[in-house]
Image (tube, rainbow, N blue to C red):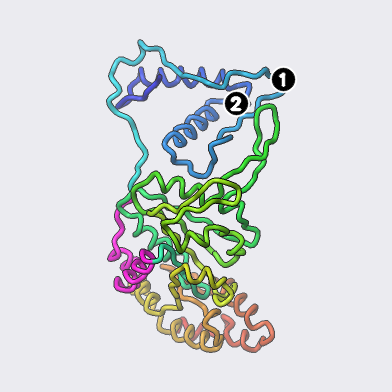
Amino acid sequence: PLRVSGPPNGETYTAVHHVASLLHEELRPFGVRDMVDVQSLIWVCAYEGKKRTGRLDAKGQVDLDIPPSVPQMNTHYEITAVPTLIHEPATWEETLPDEHPPYSLDQCSRETGLSEDELRQWTHAIERKGQAIFYGPPGTGKTFLAQKIAQHLVGGGDGVLELIQFHPAYAYEDFMQGIRPLSHGGGQLQFDLVPGRFLQFCTQAQQRSGISVLIIDEINRANLASVFGELMYLLEYREAAIPLAAGGTFHIPAGVRILATMNTADRSIALVDHALRRRFAFIRLVPNTAVLRHFHAHTGFNPDGLITLLERLNHTIANPHYEVGHTFFLHPNLPDQLSNIWQMEIEPYLEEYFFDQPNQVDAYRWSSIKEKIMG
């Protein structure tokens, strides 16, 4: 079998080209057009061999349908190179990086503007419960902070870090497992039991020794009790294994952590299933003027006028679930962007919230407030 040794030389490249050419000819009946297709196939196979693709099931990962006009071929290949072309022993192989770089809470504090003590309190809650939800109004940095905390949790280890987004059409079959049509030889469809995103994620995490983190963005946009199914039990009893509805047993690997985000302007946190609330730690995020000051301490922009206006605006909104957050204004060149941000993002948001109070919107039009911000 061909092994790429290194550092590669001219003979190595000749051998690789020879094997790739053989692959090209063998796979031409399957629709492989050129060497780019061959390279793509080799790349997918190499990643799958290292268990790094993570989103494809064991069946049909590279499902090349055989055209009806082409007779069935033996799909088992052993690729060999001309032995006289490679003389040096296989002493070096390139491997994919397995470990995430360390990411301390001190570094996270400097990048987010939040205190290290507050961040440590969050991580303690996550370790205690195994899962947490970052919730708050728009523009409070929920997804950003979930990613930063996840970066800290996996830092220095070989765990998996993945983000998915829920939506109203998201179902149990997408998240856990379900019957899916898969194409087999001859263009025939067969309905197979296929693992969903969470089962795939846990399969990867089981093979790693470090902490793995799944981030679920906008978790409250899906029907959570329906999507989670048996997972509701496992979130509370992490050491247990339970039978799945479609067969087989499942448990959450010990190293798995789940972080989620919830926009309280989209649906009040009070509407979330109470059984789910008991299983998650809830991390509340609010408009934070200290973060705004921290960020602009190095940009040259004086945020005092903007902060005063935001505090007045949020007092007018008078609902903590719908306040305007600070992350709308975390731009290094904010003076050049502020007019566009306010007119294209803040005003439409206020128009929707104050849909029956146009006078309230008019009081916060850019033309009415720009002098108060810019001075």
Q: Position of residue 279 (x, y in %)?
A: 47, 67
Q: Main secondary structure of the magenta part?
A: helix
**Residue closest to the eye, 100 or 77:** 77
**Residue closest to the eye, 72 or 315:** 72
Residue 4's label in the rendered image is: none
Q: Is residue 43 above or below residue 327?
A: above
Q: Is residue 355 above or below residue 256?
A: below
Residue 362, by quadrant, is bottom right
Q: Position of residue 145 (x, y in %)?
A: 42, 66
**Residue denoted by label 2:** 33
Extreme top residue here?
Answer: 84
**178 is within the stretch colored magenta:** no
Magenta range is: 100-128
**Residue denoted by label 1:** 69
Q: Position of residue 97 (x, y in %)?
A: 35, 42
Between disc 2 and disc 1, the foreground one is: 1
Q: Quadrant of the C terminus?
A: bottom left
Cα distance between the residues tagged 2 and 1: 17 Å
Q: Residue at x 68, y 19 (%)?
A: 70
Q: Quadrant of the N terminus?
A: top left
Q: In the picture provided, is 121 more to the left or to the right than 307? A: left
Q: In the picture provided, is 246 more to the left or to the right than 134? A: right
Numbered disc total: 2
At label 1, which amino acid type do we have?
Answer: Ser
Q: Residue at x 55, y 65 (%)?
A: 218
Q: Position of residue 285 (x, y in %)?
A: 45, 75
Q: Is residue 26 visible?
A: yes
Q: Is residue 329 visible?
A: no
* Secondary-structure class at tag 2: loop
**Residue closest to the eye, 10 or 61:** 61
